[in-house]
Amino acid sequence: MLVLGIETSCDETAAAIVRDDGMVLSDVIHSQVETHAPFGGVVPELASRDHLQNARPVILAALERANVTLADVDGIAVTCRPGLVGALLVGVELAEGLGWAADKPVVGVDHLVGHLVAGYLVRADGPPVDPPKPPFVALVASGGHTALYRVDAPSADAIREIGATRDDAAGEAFDKVAKVLGLGYPGGPLIDRLAAEGDPNRIAVSPPMPRRDSLEFSFSGIKTNVARYVEKHGAPGNDQTLRDLCAAFQKRVVDVLTSKTILAARQERVSTVVLGGGVAANRELRARIIAECTRREIRAVVPPLASCTDNAAMIAYAGIARLRRGDDDRGRLAPCPTTLLPRVTRKGRGRRESDGARDES
Ligand code: KG4
Ligand code: ZN
């Protein structure tokens, strides 16, 4: 089975052709980073307009690079949630149009399920893939989401959130801290590079939501912490203080992401953890997860960078199970800003009743 994947949920216009064994035949991405960089974040209206301009050439390039035509694919999978509604609408309407014109089934895919199945993708230029065996625990840490999931099968109905952020996503914290430090957008890769040359212990930055028995995260406090440092001491120039501050921030975030992922694996009694989402491209997080899991004889599946950040190959793969079942959403597809996956973590600040008690799960 060959599937065309289309992804337009945020600031990447992407299309890919993927075979049902996970082999990626093409993976084309047009990034809108330059459009949004002057604003320090994604501007929804600009994102939609950019998708409109680029979706057609990106899809054509995906077909051409895989050396197939629309007639050769068995179905189309398109991100329909969560994301910016105007941006999602572009991909959804294009997929519907292509589906009707070529008489191919179309299925809507939850973007988070895409991130969760990225470990199944096989890339010709990548390392050999030993796909994760469910059940496993997955950490998805991106610009819009940060949550831990129990995955019993790579399909939406077999995935359960077991903890998430109460406020900012981890990637959002990287982006906001980079903005405070005047580094530019997106902040993750910039902080990643600077932190590698810094001392994480010279500047005190308080850890984000350190409670060890909870699977919930909170990243808004650490961002405020860095902002206060800048208010008090002034923004560091391109010097060692900047590197040390980036290293201190990144270490605290990596510490909490790593320890809670391992706690989740223990609580769920699984022996595999999988990383996904843009923040999973962070070099310190990748190294720490591998090291800490190896020490505990837990298998860590850390997909290649191209599978972690937003792409349409993961969307195509996430659609395969439903296409195989004969599902077809044509005529019923609608974009939605929220995920389909049931949530257990309440958003918002403040103490929870459970904060004083021990975790019983
Ligand atoms: O998954 P993704 O590409 O898009 C969303 O679904 O949000 O994630 C983008 C996020 C951004 O916040 C970006 O700063 C972060 O991932 N990111 C990183 C790194 N590369 C991208 N964060 C930390 N370290 C990185 N190397
Ligand atoms: Zn994403």
Image (spheres, rainbow, N blue to C red):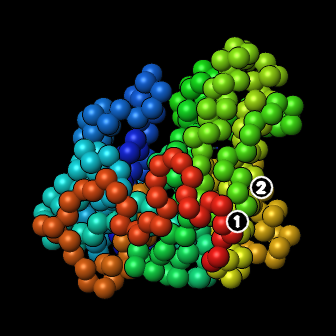
Amino acid type, label 1: Asp
Specify the quarter for ligand 1: top right
What's the mark number on residue 287? 2
**Which one is nearer the viewer's eye here, 116 or 357?**
357
Residue identifier under label 1: 213
User: Residue 280: in sight, yes or no?
Assistant: yes
- Whether residue 83 sits left or right of residue 208 in the image: it is left
Name the outermost residue toward the bottom.
325
Marker disc for residue 58: none
Occupied quadrant, residue 273: bottom right
**Viewed as shown, does residue 347 lie left or right of 287?**
left
Find residue 257 and report its horizontal and vertical position in percent.
68, 56
Residue type beneath disc 2:
Ala
Mark 2 or 1, closer to the camera: 1
Mark toward the start of the polypeptide (2 vs 1): 1
Residue under the image location 60 percent in, 44 percent down:
219
What's the residue at 47%, 49% (across, down)?
A: 348
Q: How far apart are marks 2 and 1 (CA)?
A: 23 Å
Instruction: Give the position of the N terminus as an image quadrant.
Output: bottom left
**Rendering coords of residue 166 (x, y %):** 52, 52
State the image coordinates of residue 176 (x, y, percent, origin top left): 55, 32
Between 133 and 182, the one lying in front of the other is 182
